Image (spheres, rainbow, N blue to C red):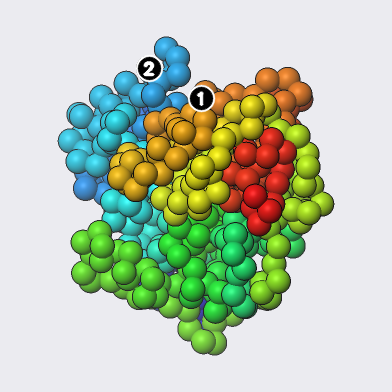
Amino acid sequence: MGLTITEKILSSHSSKTDVKPGDLLFSKIDLVLSLDIGTAGAVRIFEKMGASKVFDPEKVVMVNDHFAPAKDIEAAELSKKMREFARDQGLPHYFEVGRSGICHLLLLEKGLVMPGQVVVGGDSHTCTAGAVGAFAVGVGTSDLAASLALGENWFRVPESIRVIFKGRLQEWVCGKDLILLVLKELGIEGARYKALEFSGETIKDLPMADRITLCNMAAETGAKNAIIEPDQVTAEFLRERGANDINMVKSDTDANYSNVYEFKVDDLEPLVAVPSLPSNVKELKEVKGIKLDQVFIGSCTNGSLEDFRRAARLLKGKKVHRSVRLIAIPGTPTIFSHMIEEGIAKTFVEAGAALGPSTCGPCLGAHMGVLAANEVALSTSNRNFVGRMGHPTSQLYLASPAVAAASAVSGRIADPREV
């Protein structure tokens, strides 16, 4: 029996050659990601282990993003602890405020993740890096500390679920709608501790920005990781970032999957996740007209340049509705720079949007867009749990950047095809 791409990667990083789902193994790690929100706790455990040096400074990335720029004294202290650790360890991949960005987009933008690698990060959406064919997983504080010290960790080899998309997407339908379609089918536990492998003709035509969105929200299905086999889109993306030797690792044709789902997407309509689960998905026409107080475009899910290009096409020459706040957060400073060069930033500002520095703040209700009691918001982020972006009585809808932009202009949830 052949191996899936996830099984192949874990096998190549361990001493086991005959890998199968359910096996426990120790795997070498190619990259460890740590953030302002969790590094201090990991460092405490790292020191309790008796460790003094990280396993390889070149393979550790530390990013200010969740509470950055520091929202309060406590956040500033967390960032300070990470800054001091990065300095003491001589880490070349430490990203300070202003040169930082939302970690999952930053890793890919900087070409720090490659196909066939094993990546662990102190954040549940580390699975985003599966967009370039890496086995990338979020871990807790203890596992993060062990990974920093040892450069390896133990994993249970996940079963793989294959998701096949067939057909071509309509205009204004994108990667966000694909993953919402999957969430509607699988629910928030349907892929628990499994590898979601996305494939099919639709994927081959999908730009990297949409692949990022797709893999990012696999976390909301409970998946251990998400992954897309590297192809020419992947190779072009990585070569633009200086990569030469690209491991085009693929699943065997006779690989075994615990489940296979097939979706035909030619007639797929824009989708919206309604309060208060990412899996509570409805077609846009079912929720159109709901009045909004705030719209947020950004996050690790939809903070790519292509996401802002789509939104700008709808905002051009229009104004944000007077009853709505539109907050836009580019995923990295480089994305922000391209937005300025292309006139996208000007379009947002002239429309009446508030453009902010690269941060996770609004997504987790930390700062720069917290919701008040009973307010209603539409966001391009990944979670709409009770109180996710603010007050427990607020309500949060999830949708694509196109739906978000159309809704900001309309003052209500709106169809981009009608704006």
Numbered badge on residue 77: 2
View extreme (right): residue:
286
Residue at image location 29% in from the left, 56% down from the top? 111
Asked whether the viewer can see residue 286, the reply is: yes
Q: Please, is residue 272 above or below residue 117 in the view?
A: above
Of the pair 267 and 87, the residue shown nearer to us: 267
The reply, left or right, for residue 57 in relation to residue 106 is: left
- CA distance for labels 2 and 1: 19 Å
First-in-chain label (2 vs 1) = 2
Residue at image location 20% in from the left, 29% down from the top? 87
Residue at image location 72% in from the left, 26% down from the top? 375
Q: Where is residue 103 in the image (x, y as percent from the top left)?
A: 39, 42
- Which corner quadrant of the image does residue 75 belong to? top left
User: Which structural element holds mark 2?
Assistant: helix
Question: Label 1 belongs to which residue?
Answer: 368
Q: Position of residue 348 (x, y in %)?
A: 47, 37
Amino acid on which disc 2 is placed: Glu
The reply, left or right, for residue 103 in relation to residue 165 is: left
Amino acid on which disc 1 is placed: Met
Q: Position of residue 54 (x, y in %)?
A: 26, 40
Q: Where is residue 98 in the image (x, y as percent from the top left)?
A: 29, 31
